[in-house]
Every structure is written in C-alpha cells, then in structure tokens.
Image (cartoon, grey):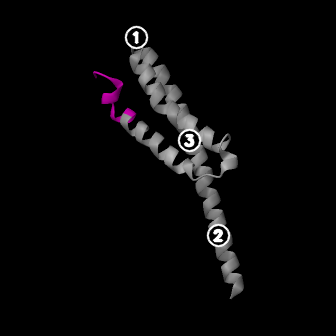
Amino acid sequence: MNSHKDLIVWQKAMSLVEDMYSLTKGFPEEEKYGFTAQLRRASVSIPSNISEGAARNGKKEFEHFLYIGLGSVAEVETQLHNITEIRRMIQGLIGHLISDKD
C-alpha cells in the first residue's frame, strides 16, 4: 500500500461521506446542529480514522484507528436504522389513514 487512498475501504468511506452530506442537505433547518451534524461528523470520522491509522508507525496503531472507524460506522448505521424504522412507521400510518377513508 502506497497510501491510504489506495485502500478500497477508504474510497468507499469517502463515498459514504458524500452520500451523507447529500442526504442531510434535505433535513430540516432545525436539525442543522443536531442530527445533521451528528451524521456528518460520524461519517467523516470513518475515512479520517482509516487515513490517520495508515499514517501511523506500525500495524498495532493502524488497527487501533480502524477500531475507532468501526465505532463510527456503528454510529451511522444506528442513525440510519432509526430513520428507516421511522419511515416505515409513517408509511404504515399513512396506509392506515387511507384505508380508514374507504
């Protein structure tokens, strides 16, 4: 490996950051310093820790930073899971309201 940029995982993590910024751009303004900031920070942390670990001296330090990045992955995954669940619940409620009209 010449650089952390050669790692496919780093490249995919950078794509995730772009996706998170696009996704959160549509969030309500009142979430700018809450949920939006949290998702963006956690997603940026993933490739940042990969690159920082790769720049360190030795496998043990690299592994340490990869574990920190993995923690950030879990954080983003949790937030997105909550969004998916809430979306399903809202869609279910809409379906219930529509079926009550009939």
The 10 Å Cα crowd at callout 3, few under 14, some 14 to 19, many 20 or more, is: many
Tell me where the magenta segment starts and ends, as one range: 1-10
Sequence-wise first label, 2 or 3: 3
Q: Position of residue 92 (x, y in %)?
A: 64, 70
Mark 2: which amino acid? Gly
Q: Is residue 60 left or right of residue 4?
A: right
The 10 Å Cα crowd at callout 1, few under 14, some 14 to 19, many 20 or more, is: few
* Label tally: 3
Mark 3: which amino acid? Val
- Farthest bottom residue in view: 102
Q: Looking at the image, is 89 positioned above or below residue 51?
A: below
In this figure, which residue is indicated by the disc labeled 3? 76
The 10 Å Cα crowd at callout 2, few under 14, some 14 to 19, many 20 or more, is: few
Nearer-the-camera pick, 24 or 90: 24
Q: Position of residue 1 (x, y in %)?
A: 28, 23
SS category of the residue bearing label 1? loop
Sequence-wise first label, 2 or 1: 1
Judged by its main secondary structure, the magenta piece is helix
* Residue 92 disc label: 2
In this figure, which residue is indicated by the disc labeled 1? 57
Q: Is residue 99 left or right of residue 41?
A: right
